[in-house]
Image: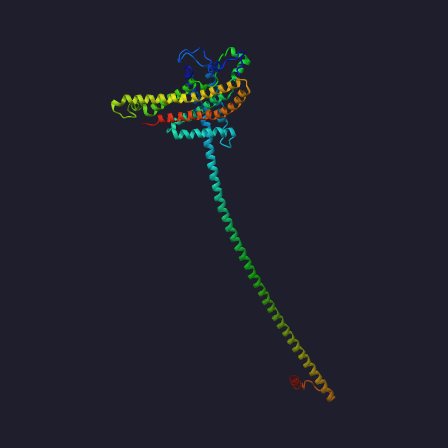
Amino acid sequence: MNLNATFIAQMVVFFILGWFTMKFVWPPLMKALDDRAKKIAEGLEAAEAGKLALESSSRQAGDEITKARSRAAEIIAQAEKRSVQMIEEAKLAARDEGGREKAAAKAEIEQETARAREALRDQVAALAVAGAEKILRREVNPAAHTELLSQLKKEI
Amino acid sequence: MAASTEAPNASEYIVHHLTHLTNKAQKSVIDLTVVNFDTLFWSVLMGAIGCFVMWRVARAATAGVPGRFQALVELLVEFVNDQSKNIVNNEESRKFVAPLAMTVFVWVALMNSLDFLPVDLPAMILGVTGLDHVIHAHRIVPTADLNGTIGMSLGVLVLMLYYNIKIKHLGGFVHELFCAPFGSHPLLWPFNLLLNLIEFAAKSVSLGMRLFGNMYAGELIFMLIALLGATATWWGFGMHMVVGTIWAIFHILIVLLQAFIFMMLTLVYIGQAHEGH
């Protein structure tokens, strides 16, 4: 328990060590701690922002999907309507075509009939003339009997 | 246990272990021409080791993922910084006081930890290397020397006075010395001054004495335990191991606790210097 000059030296050492720590140890450590705190804060902030962005983009994606789905349904409905329409049109066109062909055939038949009748009429006239010739056994002047013949032709 | 040829008796052994390595024998209680080389050597060495290790950590410190040792030092830094923020109410002062408090903690803890070395190991090393002819006596724990602890507590006293004057200016400080705590009536001036002087003295002396007393007693008990083993009986040998182990484990607590108390009181005393009455 003797006091001597040692305590004065110890006091000096005390201040030197304190100064050393203040100068060389404390600032870098505090800087590292503060920097890390800032880094962590930034990281948390970024995570929060990322979460928000994810939320909004997933909401957007959902909207897009709904829109696409309704658009697809619309397209399908349109296509169905169109196909029904096309079938109707085809049916109508076929019906028209049939009618037209039928009419044309009818007309042709009529034409043929008329032609046949004309020919028949000519042949009957000739036959009649030949018959009359035979009956009369003589040449009849066709010119003199033209009127009669044409009247006969009409009657046939 | 003592490695000398003629075995000393118990009191000689203890007296030998409590003798410092000095430039000359100290005759009076206070003699400023005497220097304890052992105390100075070990305290400077421990301070240098502590500061060097902290400096190495600080230099390599990154804001990224810290290593284990960096995390340990950062834990200490955060802890001391929080304490000083609570206690010392001045941003500018904290720039010096907080690092000082951390140094004090590390330094005192390291100096106290020298107590864990076996009490006879330094003497044995000196004996083996032949240095015991030059170094006739040697005490290894600087904080078990009153000079070591009083030196630090007087450093704290200097800081108390410095911050008192810096914060309150000389006039304010002198006014406080005379007018607080009883009142500013001139009749009360002597009592105020006396009480304030006693307060400053008590703070410094108790700060130094507390650490010294704890470490001195711890050292003394280690010596007594070592004397048990020196009885060279099975009982003494067993008790040396059992009691020595128990006391050493308990002493780990004391070493860190006293370092912590010294640090906290340093902060508290300097913090009080920042507050007016």
Query: Image height check: is A124 above or below A1?
Result: below
Query: Image height check: is B214 above or below A150?
Result: above
- Say if residue B47 shows up in the picture: no
The location of residue A38, given as percent across then percent down, is: 46, 34
**Tally of numbered discs:** 0
Left or right? Give the position of B74 relative to A96.
left
Residue under the point 36% across and 26% down: B272
Query: Image height check: is A10 above or below A44?
Result: above
Q: Residue furthest bottom?
A: A136
The location of residue B78, given as percent across then percent down, is: 45, 30
- Say if residue B189 shows up in the picture: yes
The location of residue B14, given as percent across then percent down, is: 48, 16
Which of these two is toward me, A29 or B228?
B228
Residue A153 picture quarter: bottom right
How was the colour assigned to the protein in this rendering? rainbow
Query: Image height check: is A51 above or below A118?
Result: above
The location of residue B154, given as percent across then percent down, is: 39, 20
Left or right? Give the position of A10 relative to A147.
left
Quadrant where the C terminus of chain A lies?
bottom right
Residue under the point 51% across and 49% down: A61
Which of these two is toward me, B79 or B143?
B143
Quadrant where the N terminus of chain A lies?
top left
Which of these two is toward me, B246 or A122?
B246
